[in-house]
Image (spheres, grey):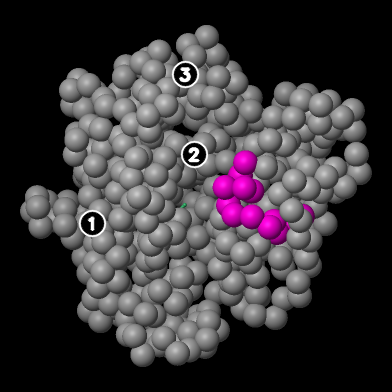
Amino acid sequence: MSLFYRSTRDDSVKVTASQAILKGLAADGGLYVPEQIPALDKSFEELSKMSYQEVAYEVMKLMLDDFTEEELKNCINKAYDSKFDTKVIAPLVKADGAYYLELFHGSTIAFKDMALSILPHLLITSAKKNNVKNEIVILTATSGDTGKAALAGFADVKGTKIIVFYPKHGVSPIQEKQMVTQKGDNTYVIGINGNFDDAQTGVKKIFGDKELEKVMNEAGYQFSSANSINIGRLVPQIVYYVYAYARLLADGEVKAGEAINVVVPTGNFGNILAAFYAKNMGLPIHKLICASNENKVLYDFFTTGIYDRNREFVLTTSPSMDILISSNLERLIYRIAGNSAEKNASLMQSLKESGKYEITDDMKAQLSDFYGNYATEAEDAAMIKKLYEDTGYVIDTHTAVAASVYEKYQKETGDTTKTVIASTASPYKFTRSVMDAIDNKYDVMSDFELVDELSKLSKVKVPQAIEDIRTAPVLHDTICDVDKMCDNVKRILHI
Ligand SMILES: *Cc1c(COP(=O)(O)O)cnc(C)c1O
């Protein structure tokens, strides 16, 4: 074992991968980062003959090097199984000259499944390795997608319970139906009378309650989170970029060593950071193209070197990218600051106090791997329509942000490098926006009528995840006030 993780805000912190997974966030509020990024030790030819699970092992063994081969393979095999509706797990589809990497074949038909299907197994393995005897209780506040993906990931995983709070009147009907029909004896879903911020604040308060922590510990429980900053979510996301490259090579689309571009529809900066790590592991990536929607903080950051969250929050049709603080960007900032916890911590302090910070020219010069741009709502819809009309391929609203930014990039640069676009959600997850983009005549139809219509038009079978919720019984109907959240947690845990 030789790879340790450091905190982005305190140089004295040094933990193993499994400890970083267990803790999630460092005590100083920093994010865990690997001391160095290990190089892939298999050739692209070798990787091109491997299954998704095999590539996952080759990548993850390097980043999580305190896991034994048996532990890691066990986690991988439990995660990437028949929960995915295709054996290849993440298929590549060529349309209009680009390669769409479909990351939505898991149980909730969005890319969060790629990491949340393995995180529970990494977490309980980490607990065992560190002699944690307590049962892990995952506590999450959700505005929709993460909650369902976490529920699906943790359902019936021994040694864990998961409690999800969502704003009763702040999620879409499909999202609510997905959550309240969740099976699994260890799953709990509670609607709160409040908005997402209330849910988030309530959860943070429960996490910070020292008295509760003591009582929990005595009863044999401890909290953990399934937050997107956990390296147990970041590392599994590196895998599919390596896998995509291996597939392109196997299919004769690229020669070994030939560079590709990667386009990522970005919110919290986790997915694109994983691509950046893949590049640093030796994957030949030319440009990392960061695509934003109208909440274009990242585009502004890449063009000016100033990160500024002081702006109006725009509600778009790509809600999973409606984010003004991209938490995972901190890992990149730390790195371009020369792995300086001190410099990074001072920028993060400034973000906290004034909502903005500016990086130095020196730091900016190290961002040349990245290209940032954004798509407006109109451009997003036009892209869905155009791609469908030209090729018959239907993409969701998030993926369309990426496709639209890629088009701008090509116009600006003339770059003809082969390009992989991360396709982060099934169009069935955002059926109404997708169908509206294609033709406004669909306006009058109900949600499930639209689903059937989309199936006809795209010639893609309705995913099981959608079929399931048509008829699934409601299994969770608890509603509570914000000030009763903690009482509900105690009731569930009988403490
Ligand atoms: C979470 C999410 C994103 C954004 O990914 P980040 O890792 O937060 O940048 C994009 N698209 C979809 C569908 C998502 O669920």
Q: In terms of sequence position, does the residue under pointer 3 or pointer 2 come before the other?
A: 3
Q: In terms of sequence position, does the residue under pointer 2 or pointer 1 come before the other?
A: 2
- The residue tagged 1 is 405
Q: Position of residue 142 (x, y in %)?
A: 60, 52
Is the residue 251 above or below the residue 367 in the image?
below
Q: Which residues are magenta?
A: 188-201
Q: Amino acid at mark 1?
A: Val
Q: Position of residue 163 (x, y in %)?
A: 73, 49
Q: Residues within 10 Å of mark 3 (few under 14, many from 20)?
A: many
Q: Amino acid at mark 2?
A: Leu
Q: Secondary structure at mark 3?
A: loop
The answer to whether mark 3 is within 8 Å of ligand 1 is no
The disc label shown at residue 179, or none: none
Q: In front of the other: label 2 or label 1?
A: 1
Rendered residue at 53%/64% (across/down): 109
| Image quadrant in which you'd find residue 425 | bottom left
Alpha carbon distance from label 3 to label 2: 18 Å
Where the C terminus falls, by quadrant? Answer: top right
| Image quadrant in which you'd find residue 314 | bottom left
Q: Is residue 188 left or right of residue 411?
A: right
Q: Secondary structure at mark 1?
A: helix
Residue 161 appears in the picture as rendered = no
Q: Residues within 10 Å of mark 1 (few under 14, many from 20)?
A: many
Q: In front of the other: label 3 or label 2?
A: 3
- The residue tagged 3 is 9
- The residue tagged 2 is 234
| Image quadrant in which you'd find residue 123 | top right
Rendered residue at 30%/42% (across/down): 298
Q: In front of the other: label 3 or label 1?
A: 3
